Amino acid sequence: MKLLSELARSAGLPAPEKDIPVTGISMDSRTITSGELFCALHEAHIFQAISRGAAAVLTSQDSGLSHAAVPLLPSDDLRRSISSVCSAFYDHPSHRLITYGVTGTNGKTSTAAYLYQLLKFCSHKSFLISGGRTGSSLSTPEAPQLHQLLNRCLLEGATHGAVEITSHALSNRNCRTADLRLSGVIFTSMGRDHLDFHPTLEDYYRVKCSILNLAAKHAPVILSTTSPLLPLLKNHETDLRLLGRDICINRSNDTMFELTGPGGLKTVKLPRSPGYLQENMLLAVTAVWDELPVYSDLSEVLFTPPGRGEVLKLRDERQVIIDYAHNPEAIERVMMEYRDEGRLIVLSGAAGNRDQGKRPIMGEKLDSWSDLLFLTEEDPFGEDPMQIIRDILEGVSRKVPGKTLFIHPRRETAIGHALSSMEPGDTLLLLGKGHERTIRYGTTSRWWDEKEVLLHLARILDLGIG
């Protein structure tokens, strides 16, 4: 519990006319409970929040609301103020934890999971805040939930952990992580994405690099020598640890990696995984390098989250790979991984109301690397699924409709047709949905589970799930 005046002071806001105790913080007028501070992103929800027991309201300076039944805290930068009061309410939990921020275009969720697992391997009581684990649809939760989760981790005795951080969360438009303090940063692979939110690729990269503003001075910053972000990091006071320079791969043989770095030679055994996932594992290994013994068998330590390179074996050496890849770079990396394993059948789509410019680029990649291509829905949101497919088709020039190119707006129909087209030794890639549990249309959604739908259709087609 905190006094409203304390929270106002933490955000640099004028003291309220009436000081009251605050029992919690919420941005949702539907679930707010008595005694909480309501953070009003939408003025229309204020009176509902008050009727449900909100003790005070943090609102925009230009909301026009000058009086209410409860004290008001007006702010000229509402998002920034929300972050400040949330951190202060929980006594700045990230300041008392060893917290790594994990960001990038692709591989954030898997890398954060690997780091969490490695921290446990190094005998730390660890935590993970990442997509699919928080109960939020956001990979990085809003500030009230983020600091509440960090505080809960502290109360449960955690000391080290990883937080997945998106460019949306870092941006000044959202400020979800503005009061997070990081003890280290990992940048995963970068590419084009979210240009519906960011005006340019340069702005997207700049916002990604702004995560360093959250890091302690000389905090370790881990990334690959091939990262396009390297030129943007030269003027930051950071301890760059580059995979490929500071931690080098001397030799590798399938799952055994002989590495050199500070302190000399170390060997790690990784689980059998595609190369793009092993790279994420090695980024996490770089973060905990100093704590690893000379030999570490991590084959039973590191587990990839569902929907990332998830393999299902079928009869006659057929296999299906479920992967979340949904932008040009990720799609190409996944297809390159499996290109030499028989015919490559690829099923993909693109999300609606998102970076329309990437769709023809995705089409070009899909066209170049696949033998058979199935285009279908992903999350259409408010767009016509067929228009999204037509945008992808702008990049497709080599495929013949009805022979090597098939279009099915309904995803389960596309998966059934792709499965029935498989021959012995073929690999089918199901891209774009991964772990997600819904397909979204405008303001509605329907249940979806890529793996469950796949298994159901494979049984109907008698493909012998192994």
Image (cartoon, helix red, strand yellow):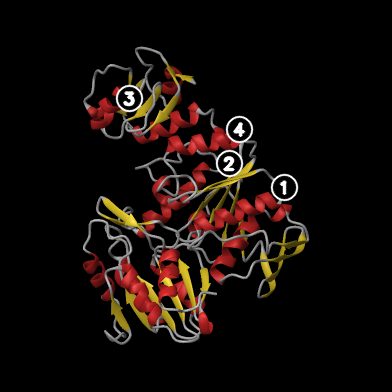
Q: CA distance from mark 1 to mark 4?
A: 18 Å
For badge 4, the amino acid type reads: Leu
Residue 52 is labelled as 3
Q: Which residue is mark 1?
A: 123
For badge 2, the amino acid type reads: Ala
Residue 192 in the image, given as x and y percentages of width and height: 39, 63
Ranked by sequence position, the earlier of labels 3 and 1 is 3
**Left or right: 249 with respect to 424?**
right
Which residue is at a point 27% across and 85% down the rendered structure image? 402
User: Which one is in front in this view, the residue at disc 2 or the one at disc 3?
Assistant: 3
Q: Which residue is mark 4?
A: 155
Residues at discs 1 and 4 in contact (Cβ within 8 Å): no
Q: CA distance from mark 2 to mark 1?
A: 23 Å
Residue 251 in the image, given as x and y percentages of width and height: 70, 74
Q: CA distance from mark 3 to mark 1?
A: 44 Å
Between 334 and 200, the one lying in front of the other is 334
Q: CA distance from mark 2 to mark 3?
A: 40 Å
